[in-house]
Amino acid sequence: MKIGRNDPCPCGSGLKYKKCCFGKDPAGAEDLKERYLRQYQIRLKGPEDIEKIRLAGRLAVSILELVAASLRPGMTTEEINTLVHDFTLAHGAVPAPLGYRGFPKSVCVSVNEEICHGIPGPRILDSGDIVNVDVTPILDGYYADANQTFFVGPPDARARRIVAVARECLRLGMAAVRPGATTGDIGWAIQRYAESQKCSVVREFVGHGVGFAFHEAPQILHYGRQGSGIPLVPGMVFTIEPMINLGKRQLYLLDNQWTAVTEDGSLSAQFEQTCLVTTDGVESLTPYALKD
Ligand code: MF3
Ligand code: CO
Ligand code: CO
């Protein structure tokens, strides 16, 4: 069968054939892996890499399950850090946050109006709080990155709303992932839904390639335009991790120079998974259910 000039390129780039491999010498054609590295600094993952990230990802999910089962009003965020740190080491892994660019703890714990990068410490969790726990184990040299926002005790209506919207934002962002779609399609799907719910999308922090290192190319914006950005191809592994505010999107950093907080004091929630682009869509390498 003949490939039309406007058909998708058979190399899987997501570009039109005429804009990609058309007219190029097949013998000398640069393979996708080399092209994505040269053009975008993206390191595509092979089957062995993916299996290792999947194992790190299963551990990430187990850590989140442990935290979910242990959360109690009256506990400190430091106690969450101890749980995560000890469990990670007990499973032969290392917590990537510890010492990363000077970050002092093994997990990010962000409460209520804290958007991300909360530093565990003496803060006591109260009934009604929402708390995001973001974990990144390194297992056999491979990184997987995931987070969830939990309720501490029974949530009020605002807490339920922001957590439900943030979770749905991740689900919709992931649903946009398939070869031929672009990074911008992910951001567009997230922004469209968040704003339809009168919530806002934080712009200062983004998803990212992950696996060989904590933060790799590309950046995954959680807002944007359809068709913008980089075409998705099989073997790309990146996080989607929308931070969604109940009020305005503006933020400031606490004096610790890490923790981002909503400027208007509104609640913020986030969910993150590590996603693999497959030949026909997406596979979560940190799979947990995105349901209420
Ligand atoms: N886990 C965060 C992310 O999703 C990064 C945390 S960096 C740290 O990308 F130093 F604060 F741990
Ligand atoms: Co991340
Ligand atoms: Co993370």
Image (spheres, rainbow, N blue to C red):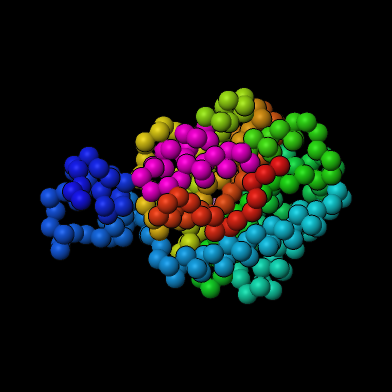
Location of residue 22 in the rendering, given as x and y in whole percent from the top left corner:
16, 48
Task: Please state the horizontal and vertical placement of residue 145, each as a whole percent of the image.
Answer: 57, 56
Residue 105 visible from this viewpoint:
no
- The segment highlighted magenta reads 167-191
**Residue lying furthest right:** 74
Rendered position, 203 above or below 280: above
Total labels drawn: 0
Magenta region includes residue 175 = yes
Quadrant position of residue 6: top left
- Relative to residue 118, is residue 196 drawn left or right? left
Q: Position of residue 48 (x, y in %)?
A: 44, 71
What secondary structure is the magenta-colored segment mainly?
Answer: helix
Left or right of residue 123: residue 175:
left
> Is 128 left or right of 264, judged from the image as shown?
right
Viewer-closest of 171 and 263: 171
Residue at 43 percent across and 55 percent down: it is 278
Q: Locate residue 87: give its quadrant.
A: bottom right
Decide: is 140 above or below 136. below
The percent coordinates of residue 240 (x first, y second) are: 52, 47
Identify the residue shown where x is 37% and y is 36%.
227
Left or right, residue 216 beside residue 31: right
Pick the residue in front: 87 or 175. 175
Classify residue 49 by image quadrant: bottom left
Residue appearing at x 75%, y 31% in the figure: 158
Q: Residue at x 36, y 45 (%)?
A: 180
Quick one: which residue is furthest to the front in this view?
A: 1
Compared with residue 71, is residue 159 higher up or lower down, i.e. above or below? above
Q: Is residue 5 visible?
A: yes
| Quadrant location, the C terminus | top right
Residue 85 falls inside the magenta stretch: no
